[in-house]
Amino acid sequence: MADVSPAGRTAGPGGALSAGPGAVARWFAARSRRELVQDTLLAAMSVLGVATLVYIFRLGSQFGGSGFDALAYWSFDPSKPYGGQPGQLVFLYAPPVALAFLPGHLLSFDAFRAVWLVSQFAALVWLGRRYALAMLLFLPISVELYNGNIHLLLAAAIVLGFRYPAAWSLVLLTKVTPGVGLLWFAVRKEWRNLGLALGATTAISVASLLVVPEMWRQWLEYLTSNPTVNTQMITVTVPLPVRLAAAAVIVVYGARTNRRWTVPVAATISLPILWLNGFAVLAAIVPLWKGDMAALQRAQPARGPS
């Protein structure tokens, strides 16, 4: 015969308690007022975040639909992928990335767009966890999902790069200049991690060079041609060398003070072209900040009784 716990729940075999009708009320009673306020605020922000994303997609549908950048990834000509000007429908990333996108050409654009959008959103959920939907209120993230660029995946690569340095190859083979974040390993004398990041990038590059040497020639020629931006989107007009110098200072400061969240800040401001959805890279701050704060708390000596 089952025992009855003082809280009014029935104890089953082994004394395990099963939730009764008052489980929800007891859960609320166990939460502090502060926690309830935080949970309510997060739920409201999550709803507003989803509403923001839906609004952006609906608004964009009046101008031809979403996925402008995703279309560039899907539609480039493998025999001559590089040409045009940044801001137009043009593929800009290194040949290994072009090869990685080629299987997507076997799909219709709608199918490719759906797969790519799921990948973007998965990166956001991994970065933000319970805060992911609320993060949609940060306009660059919603615009990033609408445009279909690669910034959220870069944010995920930066976070992963602290544990798996080879993940930096995605950054170096796409946007290139946010690789200034690798100064983190140099300043901290983490030479093995720096070697893994650069070694993985080199290995991928050499392997693709053996497969598509002509594509590499075209890409290098394109980069050295100093293409100008041709877009109606609002961009940050501070010259890239100035932004790179500022980014380097930020990374050095972060490396010396154990602030990993400074790396995505530096990566963002060092993007080759910095427009609104580029700020989506800042999504990496969420897990890194939480991790930094947890490490700081663990490092503090426990207080004994006074």
Image (tube, rainbow, N blue to C red):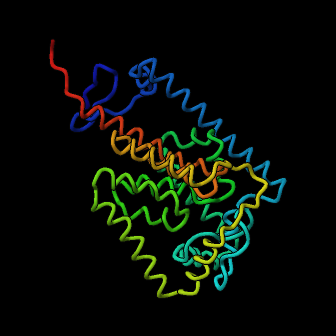
* In the image: residue 157, left or right of residue 223: left
Front residue of 285/242: it is 242
Residue at the image position 73 percent from the left and 72 percent from the top: 84
**The N terminus lies in quadrant:** top left
The percent position of residue 225, horizontal first and vertical second, equals 66, 72
Whole-percent x and y of residue 7? Answer: 32, 20
The residue sitting at the left extreme is 305
Residue 245 placement (x, y as % from top left) = 50, 50
Q: Residue at x 41, y 74 (%)?
A: 202
Task: Name above or below for residue 220 compared with residue 232.
Answer: below
The residue sitting at 41% across, 22% down in the picture is 31
In the image, is 72 to the left or to the right of 163? right
Judge left or right: residue 299 versus residue 122: left
Direction right: furthest residue? 62
Task: Note whether 217 is above or below 144 in the view shown.
Answer: below
The quarter of the displayed image where residue 81 is located = bottom right
Whether 45 is drawn above or below 93: the answer is above
* Closer to us: 15 or 244: 244
Q: Is residue 158 left or right of residue 90?
A: left
Q: Quadrant of the C terminus?
A: top left
Picture mark count: 0
Hey, which quadrant is residue 273 in on the image? bottom right
- Residue drawn at the location 29% of the way across and 31% of the way down: 297
Compared to 52, does 37 lie above or below?
above
Q: Position of residue 194 (x, y in %)?
A: 33, 61
